[in-house]
Image: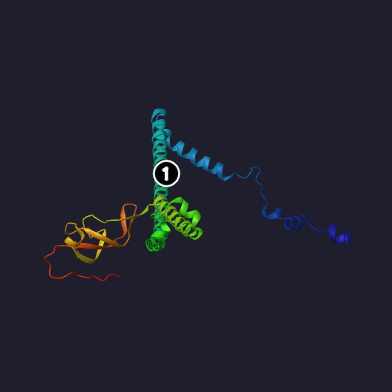
Amino acid sequence: MLQSIKSVSPLRTQFLTGSYFGIRRLYSDKPKQSKESNNVESNDSTVREDNNLSPSESCASQLEATSREFIKVRDDYLKSIADFRNLQASTKREIDDTKQRVLKWFARDLMETVDHFDSALQKIPPEWKLEGYVATDLHANPKLLELFELYEGMQLTQNVLEKTLAAYGLTKFDPVGLKFDPVLHVKVREVFADETGMHPGTVAKVLETGFIWKGQCLRPAKVEVTVENNEEERSDVETE
């Protein structure tokens, strides 16, 4: 066996190792270049292309390119700021509008509560209001004192409720004695002017209180309106 290995010809050895065909593995001794270095080389190549320009012309060309890039970046920045401010303004408007709508719905629901207070207080008998009584009568009549305290509590609750609603923009109005306004009033009935002592076209009585919301009529008042005496008939207008 050893003899067979020793007897391998030098030509066969070259064939097995590949040296016969001139095969060699080449290894680069240069490190791999990063993308940054490639970019730098591309920029350098661009600069080399401009070598035919004078130094002043080359500087002017680079300055012009930098200026264009700066203007573009500046314009994009200003546009972004404008878009952001517009978004802030529109968002604020939407939030304010939503708040106003919610408050308006809430105030509209509370109008019925105010109506109930008005109706209840109008039905209070005079003796509950201590009309014609003196302080000594309260001690002599405990029952009268209880009724007066109940009436006083209802009146106080009504005042607090109306002040709270007024703080948020809702106020009621009493148009008695004012000229009839179809925007603020709904005519339910007509009465002769000589029966009220008022001029024709004047609100004689309020049947349902009206409400103003931030300067706008939220609910018109239902009223009686005076008319001339020479009219043949009065009109009774049914409203919802």
The residue nearer to you, when weighing 72 against 143, is 143
- Residue 172: x and y in percent read 34, 56
The residue nearer to you, when weighing 156 against 181, is 156
> Quarter-wise, where is residue 152 in the image?
bottom left
- Residue 87: x and y in percent read 41, 50
Looking at the image, residue 191 sits to the left or right of residue 106; the answer is: left
Q: How is the image coloured?
A: rainbow
Q: Which residue is mark 1?
A: 81
**Disc 1 on helix, strand or loop?**
helix
- Residue 65: x and y in percent read 40, 37
- Residue 85: x and y in percent read 41, 46
Q: Is residue 146 above or below residue 52?
A: below
- Crowdedness of circle 1 by 10 Å Cα count: few (<14), some, many (20+)? few
Looking at the image, residue 36 sits to the left or right of residue 57; the answer is: right
> Quarter-wise, where is residue 110 in the image?
bottom left
Q: Quadrant of the C terminus?
A: bottom left
Q: How many marks?
A: 1
Q: Is residue 77 above or below residue 188?
A: above
Q: Quadrant of the N terminus?
A: bottom right
Question: Residue most toward the top?
Answer: 56
Looking at the image, residue 205 sits to the left or right of residue 132; the answer is: left
> Quarter-wise, where is residue 236 in the image?
bottom left
The residue nearer to you, when weighing 93 against 166, is 166
Q: Residue at x 43, y 38 (%)?
A: 49
Q: Residue at x 21, y 60 (%)?
A: 196
Identify which amino acid the numbered label 1 is placed on: Ile
